[in-house]
Image (spheres, coloured by chain):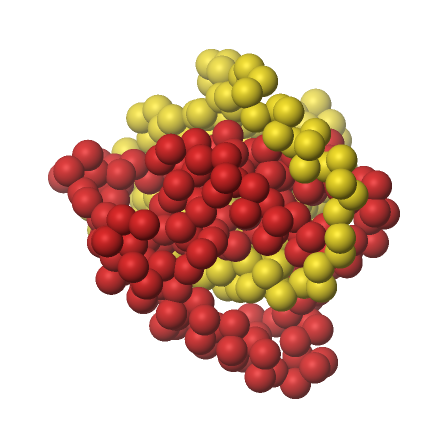
Chain colours: A yellow, B red
């Protein structure tokens, strides 16, 4: 298997560390970092900068009761947050987004399927299943899109994207990703805009498929 | 102090004592050092004093409870607390939990490597120095970015920060950890 060659840009990792990245993209970043040591290191570097900013912040005295309240809670029982492990090709953050449910593939035609993980006003994140030779639904032209390959690979005008690779595209990028021969391509795809898979479905059908 | 920890910063000492021995005295010292800075940090993003204290309490309790995850070979105490703090602030302000990467697991056989820990602290010190030497307006942009006041589009990829050296040090620290990805690829 080839190594990851398409990574998360630094500005996006910094925004992820600071928490300003919309949730849909944060799922993709957390998934990529789970698969990519290069970006895990880069993220840790940004956290170090954040730590310096924190440590150099002007100290503001805290009220005397704060420490007492805190220490009174140290022995209190608590339920640890659930930890989501990888399952097959799906990294922990995808399993977290699934919240324990099974995959529910919905067909989009031409053998292409999707499962929407989360969707809100700020964007959506979904799994896409694309048979070899089929086009990856066009989720651009309307904002920013991030596509992380979990199985198989796809290629477009900008290169080839294999497992762990992430393609980031904005409305300026005209591209037609096609799933390569071999295993069906499964991707985690996020967008910050309501999707228009215009190469795929007439606009009138979009509300039905929620794309 | 155990001889292998000579050269560690106070903060790292305290955090290791908390992690390995649930040491309350060390936790009190860590609190005295970080709580006022945390409060100042949180209030910089426009949050009032009372709510900032609630977040401080919450963050410090998380530090206590998640101490087992602290690994000084690849993260400074301040970096680790920074991420916990930002995550909590997002949980509270956006009412959504933040997706986090899978944790790397420590190789059961791996022993503490003091030179790596000290090396990381030195690199972080250099980074801090570099930040201090920035022009005030540059420094302000960095602060805004890491306080969560800039979108990723607004964060210039070129921050002028020498992140390369700290990255190579963190990479060294990570080599002690089990690579599930590597396992997968075999
Ligand atoms: Zn990467």
Task: Give A97 or A152, whichever is nearer the viewer.
Answer: A97
**Location of residue B110 in the rendering, given as x and y in whole percent from the top left corner:** 18, 43
Up-down relation of residue B125 to residue A189 (above or below): below
Up-down relation of residue A9 to residue A19 (above or below): below
Task: Give A41 or A28, whichever is nearer the viewer.
Answer: A41
**Location of residue B63 in the rendering, given as x and y in whole percent from the top left corner:** 53, 38
**Quadrant including the C terminus of chain A:** top right
Residue A53 appears left or right of A134? right
The reply to whether residue A102 is visible in this rendering is yes
Task: Give A83 or B27, whichever is nearer the viewer.
Answer: B27
**Location of residue A26 in the rendering, given as x and y in whole percent from the top left corner:** 57, 43
For residue B141, what is the image quadrant? bottom right
Q: Residue at x 35, y 24 (%)?
A: A87
Up-down relation of residue B134 to residue B169 (above or below): below
Residue A12 appears left or right of B21? right
Q: Residue at x 38, y 26 (%)?
A: A85
Question: How many numbered marks are there?
Answer: 0
Q: Residue at x 55, y 15 (%)?
A: A77
For residue A203, what is the image quadrant? top right
**Location of residue B6 in the rendering, given as x and y in whole percent from the top left corner:** 29, 59
């Amino acid at each position: 298997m080839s190594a990851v060659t398409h990574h998360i840009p630094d500005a996006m990792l910094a925004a992820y560390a600071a928490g300003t990245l919309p949730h849909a993209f944060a799922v993709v970043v957390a998934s990529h970092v789970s698969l990519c040591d290069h970006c895990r290191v880069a993220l840790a570097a940004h956290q170090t900068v954040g730590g310096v900013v924190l440590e150099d912040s002007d100290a503001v005295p805290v009220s005397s009761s704060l420490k007492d309240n805190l220490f009174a809670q140290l022995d209190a029982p608590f339920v640890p947050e659930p930890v989501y492990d990888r399952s097959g090709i799906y990294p922990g953050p995808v399993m977290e987004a699934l919240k324990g449910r099974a995959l529910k593939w919905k067909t989009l035609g031409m053998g292409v399927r999707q499962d929407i993980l989360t969707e809100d006003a700020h964007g959506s994140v979904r799994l896409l299943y694309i048979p070899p030779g089929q086009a990856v639904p066009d989720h651009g032209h309307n904002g920013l899109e991030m596509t992380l390959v979990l199985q198989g690979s796809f290629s477009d005008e900008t290169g080839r994207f294999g497992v762990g690779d992430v393609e980031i595209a904005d409305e300026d990028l005209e591209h037609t990703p096609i799933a390569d021969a071999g295993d069906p391509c499964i991707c985690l795809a996020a967008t910050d805009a309501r999707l228009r898979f215009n190469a795929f479905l007439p606009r009138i059908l979009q509300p039905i498929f929620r794309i | 102090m155990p001889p292998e920890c000579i050269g560690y910063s106070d903060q790292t000492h305290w955090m290791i004592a908390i992690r390995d021995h649930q040491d309350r005295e060390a936790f009190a010292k860590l609190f005295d050092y970080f709580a006022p800075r945390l409060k100042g940090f949180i209030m910089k993003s426009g949050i009032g004093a009372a709510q900032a204290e609630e977040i401080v309490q919450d963050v410090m309790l998380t530090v206590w409870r998640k101490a087992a995850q602290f690994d000084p070979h690849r993260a400074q105490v301040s970096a680790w607390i920074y991420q916990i703090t930002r995550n909590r602030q997002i949980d509270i302000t956006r009412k959504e939990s933040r997706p986090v990467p899978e944790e790397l697991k420590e190789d059961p056989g791996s022993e503490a490597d003091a030179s790596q820990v000290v090396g990381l602290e030195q690199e972080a010190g250099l980074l801090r120095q570099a930040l201090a030497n920035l022009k005030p307006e540059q420094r302000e942009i960095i602060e805004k970015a890491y306080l969560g006041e800039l979108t990723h589009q607004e964060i210039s990829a070129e921050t002028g920060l020498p992140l390369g050296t700290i990255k190579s040090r963190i990479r060294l620290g990570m080599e002690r950890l089990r690579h599930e990805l590597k396992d997968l690829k075999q």
